[in-house]
Structure formats: structure tokens, C-alpha cells
Image (cartoon, rainbow, N blue to C red):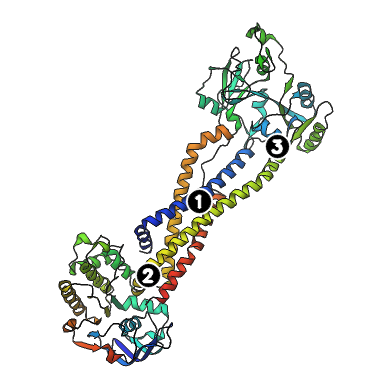
Amino acid sequence: MFFRLAAKSLLNRKGSVVLTILAMSVSIFVLLGVEHIRTQTKESFNSTVSGVDLIVGARTGSLNLLLYSVFRIGSPTNNIDWETYQAIADNSRVAWAIPVSLGDSHKGYRVMGTSTDYFKHFSYGNKRQLDFTEGKPFSDLFDVVLGSEVARKLGYSLGDKIVLAHGLGKTSFSLHDDRPFKITGILATTGTPVDQTVHISLQGIEAIHIDWQQGVKMPGSTITTDQLESLALQPKTITAFMLGLNSRMATFRVQRNINNYRKEPLSAILPGVALSELWQMMGLMENTLRLISGLILMAALLGLSAMMLASIREREHEIHLLRVIGASPVFLFLIIEMEALLISLLSILLAVSGLYLSLGLSSDFLAANFSLHMGRSLLSGNKLFFVLLIIGATIIAAALPSFFAYKNARLSR
Amino acid sequence: MTIQLKDVCYSYPDTPGKRVLNINSWAVAAGEQVFVHGPSGGGKSTLLNLLSGMLQADTGEVSVLGQRLDKISSRQRDRFRADHIGYIFQQFNLIPYLDAMDNIALAHQFAKENLSSSLKDDIKSLLSSFHIAPSDWQKPVANLSIGQQQRIAIARAMINKPELLIADEPTSSLDQDNRDHFMSELMAMVAEHNTTLLFVSHDMSLAKYFNRIDALAEINTAGAGH
């Protein structure tokens, strides 16, 4: 009867209650949305690369190197000589090396030139290796392996031929249309930028640029595909490379040696340290976002409190009647709290449903444009804590009107 | 005795110098139906609030059904009221957004024995005895006529089978027909359950229904009233 009374009382004040629920829902949506995006971004970034001890690129800031080499965000400052790569990869402390060559694209998805070691050694998440849903790694010059999202979004399957574009624009007029690539493999979904990457061999990268100068295709090329395959297509430069070391203990020594490499200015970074720097930098923004969403929630809770307080004044007869039939002042305090909690729970339900819907609708956009793969588990970890916090804050916000009801009940005559 | 007052004085806390009630001695026997009349502001509502335990006397003894209300806590008085006293007002007797069934069940909620398995049947039987059509049982009471609302108010007051029923000008918002109807149903109900009835009104035409008539001015010697 207690719950029924609270629910029917709210139904009796539909107009103001619905508006309050909407205001609360929007604020909870913002609070949980910000928190979800924040944690998912962190999780997504943290799981993108694992098992890589060092990332090496031309001399630049550690964040820039991390972002362009792993997350395909931004552009490299310079390239590295192939000889430099080979010298470092041949170091006795290095277990494996994965070269990365960037600069081309296919319908907005970045093309990465690499070696087959990439499929053997690159891992993500909790040291999970790349799996193929179909096909196998590239073996021929014009073989291509697609990330899962590229294949799904563009509707490609094994055996299809694709043309790469020079540069990174989504719409490009500089196409390598004379050298199409055949899809030989499609990777399983990883939830990382790998899903949006088109992988070809370093030799493939060299082959499509053989008649190009200053980013422009030279007219009158006479080299056939068969001739290309017989050429030794050794890359002159690459964008970056990832290293796995034989011993973790050697990481700092190898890093120092690379940073002091005499023949070429290089930067070697530890992915975990660079990510920590990134989160440190983002900390202020994260806190600001949290503060703003907290203030929005507080405004909505004050609105709830004001609405409940106004209702107490309208319900003096009801309070008196309840007192006469035996309701204690504490009962009246609790009934107002229950009404506030019902509003809060409905708002949470609405906000979480809205968030699920929004994430469902925007997940492709976030993945394609920001490489963010949003999980759907909204009520886990600290988000559950936030929900409990909202419920606690509702109880506090409703305490004032509840106290007024209690006081009215005591003075009721 | 159902009601026994002795040397009872009461002033509202915001006007401590102005005594509203001053009753030397007044009693009502079990099963009596007492009509108390008096002008507005004569202290009628204050007297009823003291008898129901909503207010506590400044001095004196307030005894209802053998229980000294001036000796027990506010929480105990709330429980005592729910268990033993039925109350009908002039208006605002019911929660407007609840239906008749819920309004009556709510009154039962606060009584000691609120686990009655036959509560729904009891409510239906009460509503039927007050000629409330079953089609009106589930409607919010705000959608019913004033006459129906007052009859439901009696049913609500009687659900816990109170030994004392207090009626505070319950007919003043009713027309002649509804008033007669209301009074005959009320008197039949209290007679059937042998309930002590304390009926307060300034409408002397209702005095014919009662076997005892008291003027508040004779009970309450305080010069000024509320």
C-alpha cells in the first residue's frame, strides 16, 4: 500500500512529475554517458596494443608517435631509413620487429604496409593475437588483408579486388588504379584500430609507388605486374616499427640506445608510459567533464526538491487525513522519500535506455571516426557506483521536502 | 466510559495566553450517541483533536476507552487512533486520486491487525452496505459525487471496527436528501456495531437523531475559542 500510495500520488501530478523525470533523465544520461565514454575510451586505447615493448619512429613527441603508429591518428613527422630499421631489428636483444608504413588509404580507411610478422607478433587486449575469420596473411605482392570493419562496411569478401588511393583523404583523385589488390584475408574483430585498417606488404607499398614522384603518378609507365613481381622491391623508408624484446629488463637500455642512435634522430617509446602521459594530459578534461555533469545532476535534483516541496503545500489536507487515520510523521517523511526515489529510478531507467539506444545508433560512427569501440555494459564498475550515488543524492535532495511533510504532520490539526 | 475528560486545558502554542479549551469534567458512556453543538470557533475541532490524540492537552486527564492519551507518546497515540477511533470530516475525507477500495484499505494499513485475509471482501461488503455501485469502486473518488464520497468516508471510518466514531460536521456539504440518507446510514451502522458516536455540528436539525445533546458552551468554560 505504501508503494501504491506513492505511485498513485505521482500519477496524480503527471505534468510536473514527467517534466522532473525528463530533467533528471537528461542529467543522468549526460553523467553516465560521459563516464561511459571516458572509461570505454581508456579501455579501448589500453587494449589496442599489448606485448609491444617499444615503438620506434622519427624524432617526435611520444604521444604523437603513439597516436599515428598505433591509433592511426595524426601524421608522422618523418620517415625512418630501412637500413636503420634493419640495424635495430638485427640487435641481439630484439626478439621481433614489425615495420609500419603509412600514407595511403582505401575509401577513408588507412592502408598499413607491414610484414607477415605483424600477424605473428602483434597482439591486443590481454595479449590476444590477431585471428583470421577468412583467408590467410598476404603472400603475393598485390595481396591485401582487411580489418573486420573494412570488410563489413564495404561489403568485401575473399577474392574481391580493391584499388588503393594515394594519401589519406576519404575521396581521392590520386588512385593506384593500375595496380589493384586481391583480398586474401579478413581479420576477426578486435575492437581496435586494426578493424579499420587495410594491410598490405611493404613490397606492395613500394610497387604501387614505383612510377610516382612527389605524390603524382608519372605518365607513360610501362612496367607490368609480372615485371614488378620479379623486381626486388626493398622499401627505402618506413613510418615506424614496433619491437618485442627478448627480455623486459633490456627495455630501457634498448630505448636509450635508439634515442641516442647516431645515424638518424629517432624516438623510442614505451606504449604503456605514453598512454599514461596521455591520460595525465586528459585528466583535467576528464575532471572538468565530470564536474559539469555533476552540476547538471545537482540542478536536476534541486528541481526535484522544489517540485516535491511545492507538492507538500498542495497536499496539506492529504497529510492531515493520513495523520487522522493513524499515519505517523515518519510515514509521511518516508512516503515523500519514496516518491522522490520512484522519480529517480524512472529517470535512471529512461537515461540508461536512452544511452543504450544512442550507443547502438552511434557505435559505427564512433568506431569509424574516432576508433572508439563502445561496449554496451552500462551498469558495470564505476557506473553502478554512479547509479548508487544518484540514488543517494536523491534521498538527500528529497530530505528537505520530506522533513516539511514530517513537520506538517506533527503540527497537523 | 468511552470518553472521560477531567480539568482539561488547552491553548495553541502560537497563542499561549489564549485558552481554547477549559473543561472541568465531561464523559461519554460506551455505546452513547452524543450530539455536540456550538458556534464556529467554539473549540469543537480542538476538542475532537484532543480526543483523537492529534493534540495533547496542556493540563488535565484525557481518557479514551480507558487509555490515558495524555500519558502516552505521540507514536502510541497514532497507533491508538488507527486501532480504536474512526473519524469523518466535513470534507477532504478521502485521498482524491485513490479509488474507494484503496482509500478504505489505506485506513486499515495503520491499524494493529492489518493482515486481514478477507480485507477486500470486508471493503466490498461495506461499500455495498452504503449503496456504492461496484462500477464506482475502482474509480478515483474525486470522480464520484459528494454524497458518495461521504458514504465512502463512513465505510473508511468503520473498516477497523472502531469503538469510538468522531464526526466533525460531516453533513454540512450535503444537500437535504443526501444529508438524511447519510444520517440514517450512519446511525444504522453505529447501532449495528454498538459504536460510541460523537457527532459535532452547528446544525440543530440533526439533533433528532441523537439520544444525548450537549452544548459545547456548557462543556467548555473557556471564554474565547478557536
Task: Classify residue A106 by image quadrant.
Answer: top right
Give the residue type that dot 3 points to: Leu
Cα separation, mark 1 vs mark 2, equals 31 Å
Give the residue type that dot 2 points to: Glu
Say which chain tag 2 marks: A
Assess disc 3: are there few (<14), some (14-19) or many (≥20) residues with their C-alpha within 10 Å of its C-alpha. some
Query: Where residue B218 appears, x then y in whole percent?
Result: 27, 92
At numbered mark 3, what does the secondary structure look like: helix, strand or loop?
helix
Q: Report the quarter where the C terminus of chain A lies.
A: bottom left
Give the residue type that dot 1 points to: Ser
Q: Is residue B51 left or right of residue A405?
A: left
Residue under numbered circle 1: A27
Residue under numbered circle 3: A63
Q: Nearer the viewer, mark 3 or mark 1?
A: 1
Could you tell which of marks 3 and 1 lies nearer the N-terminus? Answer: 1
> Same chain for the residues at labels 2 and 3, yes or no?
yes
Cα separation, mark 3 vs mark 1, equals 33 Å
Q: Is residue A358 left or right of residue B34?
A: right
Say whether marks 3 and 1 touch (CB < 8 Å).
no
